[in-house]
Image: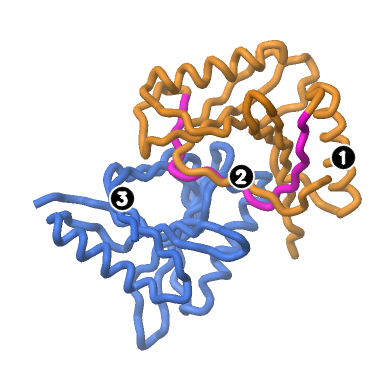
Chain colours: A orange, B blue
Amino acid sequence: MINPSDSIRFINVVSKKVRIHFNEMDATLFEFVEEIRKQKGMVKGPLFYSLNNVPMDEMMNVEMFMPVYEDSLSLPEAMSFHSYYSVENMFSICVYHDFEKFTEQAYRMLFEYMEENNLQQATPIYHVLSGDRSFPYMFVKIGAGPTIER
Amino acid sequence: MKLKRSPLTFHHVLSTTRKCKTNEWHLIAKELRNAVILNGLYATGPVIYQVANFSKEANEAEYTFYMPVNAPVDMPENDKFAYQEVFEIKDGLVFRHADLDEDIEVSYDAIKLAADANQFKLQEPFYNIYLDVYGGGIIDIYAPIVGED
């Protein structure tokens, strides 16, 4: 089921942009969390990331985000701190098993939904990792722009 | 009632300042939002605004709206929009104004009282951080601390 009115809203978010091979995704997310811990950040979650390109050559531009408990952190150059991070006007779908297969299906459903509803994609695809070890699930979210009277 | 002391940090922030009637500020906010969308950007944070030089006679004030966006903006200098790579205030007080039906001045006064009690010098106008919740809104008021006695 597609949720037609969703958003991403967190306070105290650490972010980092990377360009990686898609095989490195899991390791990169793990490293990102470790790096925050090294800066004495207490991770709160959920971990989420945006896919900022269409990976033709298997290389992906990814921005990773992690809400933390601290109001500020001293971070290395490559990382940024946002007191508030939010993306509005999103629609989303939940993937909860066979991630590889169903993530692609989720993308298809979201793009079909956009087409059917005359929406224009305004943001990259975000993956929000939720649940716990016994039941991990993931929200796939896209922001769509409102129609503008020109 | 919750009062916190913390820095305030945003990245890639577009802003615009304009004087207008107190019932027309939404037009400025809308224009900023539209400029963001028309340039292929999207907002990655709440709308933040300041109100300065309120004139009761003219029913006018000077409004500044800030909007964090997803990427750096390469923009020639112009008199309409300004851009900051990093928007950072090192020290300040945050107070949540949860009921928008109540006068925001009441919350402003609460912050000022707390600042007086702690001998903090605040800088006005304060920043209002508008947060969407369940179809309505709340405002986190951010009052920069510029000195301690």
**Residue nearest the viewer, comparing B77 with A129:** A129
Evaluate if marks 2 and 3 touch, with contact meaning CB atoms under 8 Å apart. no
Q: Which residues are magenta?
A: A79-96
Distance of label 1 from label 3 (alpha carbons) = 43 Å
First in sequence: mark 2 vs mark 1: 2
Badge 2 and badge 1 both on one subunit = yes
The kind of secondary structure the magenta stretch mainly shows is strand
Q: Residue at x 66, y 47 (%)?
A: B39
Q: Residue at x 77, y 49 (%)?
A: A3
In the picture, the disc for residue A109 is: 1
What SS does tag 3 mark? strand
Residue A70 quadrant: top left
Chain assignment, label 2: A
Q: Residue at x 80, y 19 (%)?
A: A56
Q: Is residue B6 above or below residue A45?
A: below
In the rendering, at what x and y percent does residue A120 appear? 79, 49
Q: Is residue A30 above or below residue A45?
A: above
